[in-house]
Image (tube, rainbow, N blue to C red):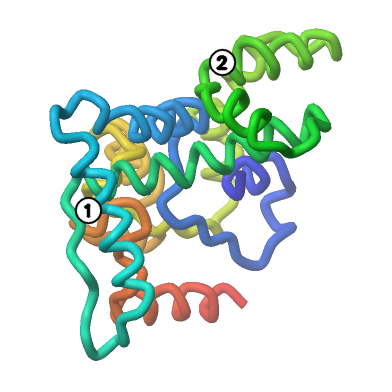
Amino acid sequence: YTLNLAATSDPDEYSCVLSINPPLNLTNGLRTLDNLFRSPAKEENLGAIKKSAMVKLLVSQNRTPEQGAVPFSDLEASFLIGVNYRFTLTQTIMSSLEINPSSTAHEKVGALSWEDYYKNIITPALLGRGIKALDLERSSNLRTRAKGLTAAKNIKLGLTGNDFLLSQEDLKWFRKSFPTDRTIFTQTGGHMGQLWKADVRKAIRAAIRKSQ
């Protein structure tokens, strides 16, 4: 959303635009998040994965910085990210359709995936306003905003080499479109997992101050 806003505004409208770990294609990014919710379902020990993830989450919330973080496995992390996303999606659907909250409503709406929401709710609603699905797809893909993005010289990005919302082709596009001096890049960190690092926070503050 940040980069879409910057790309469709006057190049000089904002003194600084800083986008951290943006997806190149918002729709693909949302599909990826939804897939994270389902990925542990293929595992035979699904119950153990869920239980372990929730226990570690509770433990980590009561730990001090001196004690350090509790390590999560990839499957545990995927499950927690997916659960958080599905909860947000459920709340969005219930709010937009003005569904009264109840355990039954949460159970039914919570079973809906991003694809269900996109195809059966968003697309028909926008079509009724004269907006075609193809137009929505194009507007969510930053490749179609390249001209506006490159025109705004005050845009800076925070990127990681292993962000699960970006394919390698997506990452190459970002790094080509935004040269080194416009990017705060770390090889690892996943999606926003690099923000705890002091050097990354320092670089972010410096990027904002330099643009002011």
Q: How many labels does the image show?
A: 2
Cα–Cα span, label 2 and label 1: 29 Å
Q: Which of 30 and 73 is in front in this view?
A: 73
Residue at left 30%, top 65%?
Answer: 194
Q: Residue at x 28, y 38 (%)?
A: 172
Within 10 angstroms of label 2, few (less than 14), some, or many (20 or more) residues? few
Question: In the rendered view, would you say 20 is above or below 39?
Answer: below
Question: Horizontally, is 170 left or right of 122 in the view?
Answer: left
Residue extending farthest to the front is 103
Where is mark 2, residue-wise?
A: 116
| Mark 2 or 1, nearer chain start | 1
Q: x, y (%) of residue 196?
A: 33, 74
Tell me, yes or no, if residue 183 can be seen here.
yes
Q: Which mark is residue 187?
A: none
Q: In the picture, which quadrant includes the N terminus?
A: top right
The x, y position of residue 200, in whole percent, is: 33, 73
Q: Residue at x 60, y 49 (%)?
A: 2
- Checking the image for residue 52, the label placed there is 1
- Amino acid under label 1? Ser
Give the percent coordinates (x, y) of residue 117: 61, 20
Circle 1 SS class: helix
Q: How crowded is mark 1: few (under 14 residues within 10 Å), some or many (20 or more)?
A: some
Element type at mark 2: helix
Q: Which of marks 2 and 1 is in front?
A: 1
In the displayed structure image, the side of residue 190 where residue 7 appears, left or right: right
Pick the front one: 26 or 61: 61
User: Amino acid under label 2?
Assistant: Asp
The reply to whether discs 2 and 1 touch (Cβ–Cβ < 8 Å) is no
Which quarter of the image is occupied by the C terminus?
bottom right
Does the image show residue 141?
Answer: no
